[in-house]
Image (tube, helix red, strand yellow):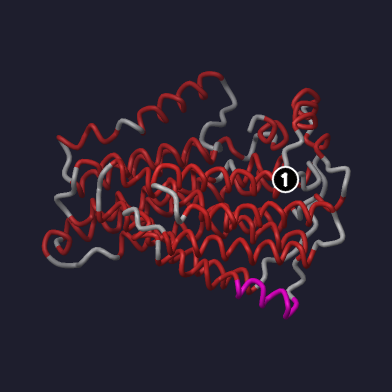
Amino acid sequence: MPPVSVPGKRVSWVELYLDLIFVLAVGRLAHVMVAEPETSSVWVALGLFVILWWTWIGFAVLYNRHGRDAPAQRLLFLAGSVPAGVAAVAIEPASEGRSTVFALSMAVTRLVLAGAHAGLGWRDVLGRRISRAYLTSAAAFLVSIWMPGPWRYVLWAVAVGGESNALLTEDRAAARRARHDHDPRALVPVDPAEALDPHHFAERFGLFLIILLGEVVISAGDVPVSGEAGTLAGWGALAAAMVLAAALWWLYFDAAAEINLKVLELSGGSPTMARAIFAAGHMLPAFALIIIAAGLGLLLEGDPPQIAYWLACVGIGIYLAGTRVFMGASSRAGGVIRVVLLVATFQLARLSDVLSAHGYVWLLMAWTVMCAALASVQSHRRDPTDDGLRR
C-alpha cells in the first residue's frame, strides 16, 4: 500500500506570474502554425517549443529545490521573466529565420538561471554543476547569433541537452535496478539535495497543462462570430470544441496526474523519475495541445486547409499516447482495442472528404469523449508503481 500523501511545497505566486510569460509564448507558437499552415511550420514550432519548455523547467526545478518565496528570490524570478517575455514575442521572427533577438533573450535568461542556482545552491556540488551548465548554454546561444541557420539550431539543441542533463541527471544504474526489482523506491537519491518535492513538481506540470488546455479554449473562442463561423452550425462546432477541451482535461486530471504524483513520491523525488515522467514524458503531450489548438482554430473558421484536419487528429493521438492513461487496460483484449483506437485516431483526417470542417469537429469531440470514458473506467484500478516503471 502506498504511503499516505503529505502536502509538500506549494507553487508560489511568482511562479504563477512567470507562467503568464509562457502563456504568451504558447499563443505565439500556435499562431506560427495558423499563419503558415504547413508541415514545416509544425517542425519549426516544435523546435522553438523544446527550447521554451526546458527554459520553463529550469525555473520549476530552481524553485522546487531552493525556493522559499522570499523577496530576493521573487526578484530573481521577475528578472528572468523579462528576457523570457522578450523571447516569447520574438518567436514569430525566429520562426522565419530572424532569430537574433530570440537567441539573445534565451542567453540572458540562462545567465539569470545560472546566477540563481549559484546563489541559492552554492554550497552543494549540484548547484555549481547546474550553474556551469547554464553558463555554457548561455555562451552557446550567444555564439549561435553569428552562425548560419542549420548549425545555429544544432548548437541550440546541444545547449539544451547539456543543461537538461545537469538539471535532472539520469542515474542509469539505479533505473535498471528499479526496473529489475519493479520498485521505484530503488531510485531514491543518495544525496537528499538532489531529491525533488513530488507535490510541487507534479503541481507545476499540471498547471502548465492547464495553460496549454487554455490555449485550446482560446483558439476555439477566438474565431470571429461572422460569416460561416457565425451560423448555427458554427456555434454548434464551437460548443463541440469546448467539450473536446474538457475531455482532454479529463484524460489527464482524472487519473494520470495522481498516478504521476504517486510514482514520484515512491521514488523519493528521484530526478531520474522526474525526468522520465514529467520533463521528457510530458514534452510531446504538451506540444500536442498546441497542435490541437492550431487545428481547431483553423477548422472553426470554415474552409480550412487540409493540414488543419491532420493537426487536430494527430495532436489528439499524440496526447492520448503521451499521457499513457488511455493505453492502460486490465486485459489483453482491452489493450488491443485501445491500440486500434489510437492508430485510428491518427487517421481520422482521411474523413475530411466526407465531413465538413464543423462536422469533423463534432467527430473529434465524440471520439475524444469516448477515449476519456474508456480511460476512466480502468484508470483507478491500476497499480501506479507498475505504471511508473513502464514509462
Q: Which is nearer the eye, 158 or 126?
A: 158
> Who is closer to the viewer here, 264 or 246?
264
For this rendering, which residue is in front, 277 or 238?
277
Q: What is the total number of numbered labels drawn onto the structure image?
A: 1
Q: Which residues are magenta?
A: 70-79
Q: Is residue 31 left or right of residue 266?
A: left
Farthest residue toward the front?
A: 146
Indicate the quadrant where residue 66 lies: bottom right
Counting other residues with Cα less than 10 Å from the Cα at mark 1, is it few (<14), some (14-19), or many (20 or more)? many
Locate residue 252, reporting x and y percent: 54, 47
Residue 227 part of the magenta segment? no
Q: Quadrant of the N terminus?
A: top right
Q: Position of residue 105 (x, y in %)?
A: 50, 65
- SS for dot 1: helix
Q: Residue at x 72, y 54 (%)?
A: 132
Type of secondary structure dominating the magenta stretch:
helix
